[in-house]
Amino acid sequence: MNGLGGLNKAPDGVVIGLVQSQLPRIETRADIARQTDRIVALVAKARANLATMDLVVFPEYALHGLSMDTRPEILCTLDGPEVAAFKRACAENRIWGCFSIMEANPGGNPYNSGLIIDDRGELKLYYRKMHPWVPVEPWEPGNLGIPVIAGPRGAKLGLIICHDGMFPEMARECAYRGAEIMIRTAGYTAPIRESWRFTNQANAFCNLMVTANVCLCGSDGTFDSMGEGMICNFDGSVIAHGTTGRVDEIITAEVRPDLVREARVHWGVENNIYQLGHRGYTAVQGGAQDCPYTYMADLAAGRYRVPWEDQVRVTDGTGCGFPAPTRRYAGASDAREAAE
């Protein structure tokens, strides 16, 4: 499976393009406008590059760069000009697109948000990063859960962002909600290279789910991002991998959601996403369907606490230059209602 990077497309195939876009340096609103134009041009490049492409994916921070700048003048909104430009680009090029914005939040710190727009220019998925890469990132923790949508050719899509993918629970939630393809966008730099690779593969294998993953690429003069566009099949094997670090290269492959569905139904050995809730079904009818995991019960009850809790030294962002927060987390229910 791959179809020579999507050149040869099966009737049930979905062709994905991962843009290893150049890490930008952003300081002003004018920089945001120029980078928006650059991303729009790359959407057009993706369409011209491969007529069979269904979905083009841009990395986290593709618009804002890695400065962690929270000044209001460079932030975005869903009804702002940047998102409008992305919608037009998808409609004009008849392609689905996945984009990243740093979203203004009147009630606190900005959100690190991901968007999926369809080939008619309509916003179909809106996600706020659940696990900012603390202590480095100042973003408000996401409060909209992990949405899963019907994407191109009916494939079920989920989206997580960067550090989210280091938590196996995030990929499991995507799969549990039906995702057949999980997108992971990132701005990671070289020290995370090996962790990036094996978590992308593990997230795929443990959930019988395709993972499509891409980082920023190149240098902004301070940071060096690594590219590493990577598409993993549901058995954990790597279908396509951008290892050259070439900026603006589009890593492409065809994936087969129909085979994901087939595996989830017909696999016995290593059907882990099913077997988690049906332990030992060879011995007991239907398997054990309890919850023997202490951390799950404690997290749900709001009393999550690791045995070494009192010894943890880094518990806020002061070491990275951010003031210690004074607000408590307000919860997710109000935010979900507002988004709907």
Image: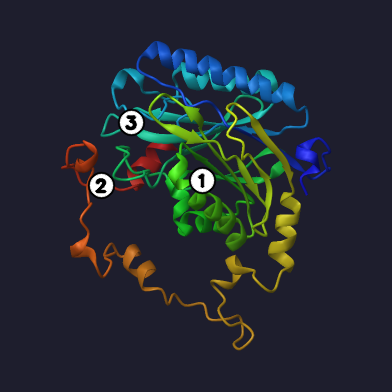
Q: Quadrant of residue 183?
A: top right
**Residue 36 position (above or below residue 179):** above
Answer few, some or many: residues within 10 Å of disc 3's Cα (few below 14, many 20 plus, some between 14 and 19): few
Secondary element under disc 1, as helix, strand or loop, is loop
| Residues tagged 1 and 3 counted as in contact (Cβ below 8 A) | no
Q: Residue furthest bottom?
A: 283
> In which quadrant will I find the C terminus?
top left
Q: Which residue is mark 2?
A: 329
Identified at 34% across, 44% down, the residue is 141
Q: CA distance from mark 1 to mark 3?
A: 25 Å
Q: CA distance from mark 2 to mark 1?
A: 21 Å
- Residue 145 seen in the figure: no
Front-lying residue, 128 or 246 = 246
Front-lying residue, 47 or 313 = 313
Image spot of residue 18 (x, y percent): 62, 35
**Residue 303 position (above or below residue 69):** below
Answer few, some or many: residues within 10 Å of disc 2's Cα (few below 14, many 20 plus, some between 14 and 19): few
Of the two numbered discs 2 and 3 in the rendering, the one whose residue sits closer to the viewer:
3
- Residue 163 seen in the figure: yes
Residue 147: give its label: 1
Q: Which residue is mark 3?
A: 68
Q: Quadrant of residue 301?
A: bottom left
